[in-house]
Image (tube, helix red, strand yellow):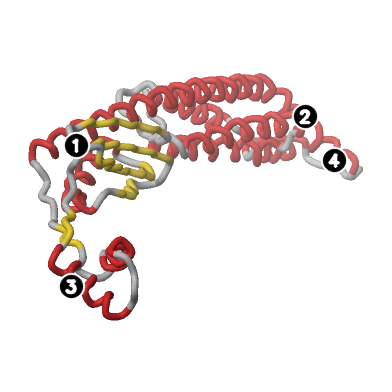
Amino acid sequence: MIYSMTGYGKSVLQLPTKKITIELKSLNSKNLDINARMPSIYREKELSIRKQLAGALVRGKVDFSIYLEVTGEDTSSQINKPVVKQYIEQLRDVVNGDDIELLKMAVRFPDALNTEREEIDENEWKSIQNEINKAVTTLSSYRLDEGKVLEADFVKRIDTIENILEKVIAMDPERIEAVRERLLKGVEELKEKYDENRFEQELVYYIEKFDITEEKVRLKNHLNYFIETLNSKDSNGKKLGFIGQEIGREINTIGSKSNYAAMQQLVVQMKDELEKIKEQLLNVL
């Protein structure tokens, strides 16, 4: 079972005088990178929120937002009446105007409003934490659904590589014989006498350098291990990435040793499938 790092989660909390919306967006990243945006009243809780998210989301580039909308008569700002009155009196000495126009000007001056710092209500904060958990759950569900799509694609491409490998295995005796004939023909064209026993020994030594038996076995094992890891309980994109590198190493070695055009074409097909797997592995948690 794997999870994608791509996901979206949202939750809305309706209180008597305010509406709080929690929003989470996640994209792929090598590590956990949280970008948090929230009203200043909740800023003191940012560290707690980051710990809450880190424990649940593990990895990814995460955008976390809290949106606050006041829906009732609840404000922390009050008009500083004595100061505003003084501003109006001073303005009357400078300009002629009715009281409404002077008031509009006065409230723009410093200290015209008294803003009291709101304290977070603990019951309200517990409700917000619950909503954050709901948003995380929604995002995790989204990640799981995306992971299932990726998993199906991985299985399909690993099967394709395995099928191509079977063709490589079936072609190997033909390849060895072709290499042998090519070398023998080259020697005969020299029109020189040679010791057949010695030539046969050198031929065996030379062909052994092109032997891909170990690479075929290791590649098969790596493909099986990839599927085994894919089906494990934990989503581990980094581990799958390491296995992908090992698969690529064996495919490259087969290609460099093949010395046979038909087999090299099969190697190119395996490389193409593996590249598509590697691209998608960047999205796996």
**Mark 4 belongs to which amino acid?**
Gly
Question: In which quadrant will I find the C terminus?
Answer: top left
Residue 94 in the image: x percent, y percent?
A: 31, 80
Q: How many other residues sit within 10 Å of disc 2, few (<14), some (14-19) or many (≥20)?
A: some
* N-terminal label among 1 and 3: 1
Q: In screen coordinates, is 108 left or right of 143?
A: left
Q: In screen coordinates, is 191 left or right of 107?
A: right
Residue 92 in the image: x percent, y percent?
A: 27, 75
What residue is shown with label 3? Answer: 86
Q: Nearer the viewer, residue 238 or 260?
A: 238
**Mark 1 belongs to which amino acid?**
Thr
- Answer yes or no: do the residues labelled 1 and 2 have beta carbons within 8 Å? no
Question: Which mark is in front, 1 or 3?
Answer: 3
**Mark 3 belongs to which amino acid?**
Gln
Query: Residue at 72% of width from left, 32% of height from top?
Result: 265
What residue is shown with label 2? Answer: 178
* N-terminal label among 3 and 4: 3
Question: Which mark is in front, 1 or 4?
Answer: 1
Assign a secondary structure to mark 2: helix
- Answer yes or no: do the residues labelled 3 and 4 have beta carbons within 8 Å? no
Residue 158 in the image: x percent, y percent?
A: 53, 24
Q: Nearer the viewer, residue 6 or 99?
A: 99
- Mark number, residue 186: 4
Query: Residue at 66% of width from left, 19% of height from top?
Result: 170
- Answer yes or no: do the residues labelled 4 and 2 have beta carbons within 8 Å? no
Assign a secondary structure to mark 4: helix
Question: Which mark is in front, 2 or 3?
Answer: 3
**Mark 2 belongs to which amino acid?**
Ala
* Structural distance between the alpha carbons of marks 3 and 4: 108 Å
- Answer yes or no: do the residues labelled 1 and 3 have beta carbons within 8 Å? no
What residue is shown with label 1? Answer: 17
* N-terminal label among 1 and 2: 1
